[in-house]
Image (tube, helix red, strand yellow):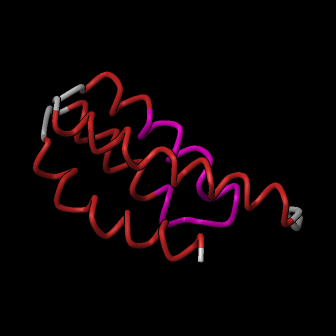
Amino acid sequence: MKIPEKLLQSYINRRIEELDQIESALHNKEYDLLFKIGHQLKGNGAMYGFPEISSFGELVETGATQHDINAIQLQFSSYRNFITKLSN
């Protein structure tokens, strides 16, 4: 099933808006929030045709569960770059 362009763009825009929230949660070590965000990304990334988002979500979810901020931070800049390129 092809996702309508308008819906796809809305999804990407939400991911862009979420970047600052993730960065703040990383900085403040908000594991519960990181888990929630990761869980959502893991579940919906592939549904919208972005398995990379699902993979990052799984990493965030696991990192939050294990309180491993470093694991998440190591991948965050690549994820930010990926999302930013999608919006262009």
Residue 32 in percent (x, y) is at 31, 22
Left or right: 79, with 8 as reference point: left
Q: How many marks?
A: 0
Left or right: 5, with 29 as reference point: right
- Where are the magenta residues, as a range? 37-54
| Residue located at (59% from left, 55% from top) | 45
Q: Main secondary structure of the magenta part?
A: helix
Q: Quadrant of the N terminus?
A: bottom right
Residue 21 in percent (x, y) is at 38, 38
In the rendered view, tell whether residue 70 sits above or below residue 50. Answer: above
Query: Quick check: is 84 in the magenta stretch?
Result: no
Residue 33 in percent (x, y) is at 35, 26
Left or right: 53, with 88 as reference point: left
In the rendered view, tell whether residue 76 sits above or below residue 87. Answer: above
Q: Residue furthest top?
A: 32
Q: Nearer the viewer, residue 22 or 38?
A: 22
| Residue located at (84% from left, 66% from top) | 5
| Residue located at (43% from left, 59% from top) | 55
Snapshot quadrant of residue 27: top left
| Residue located at (16% from left, 30% from top) | 29
Snapshot quadrant of residue 66: top left
Q: Quadrant of the C terminus?
A: bottom right
Q: Nearer the viewer, residue 59 or 79?
A: 79
Residue 16 in percent (x, y) is at 51, 54
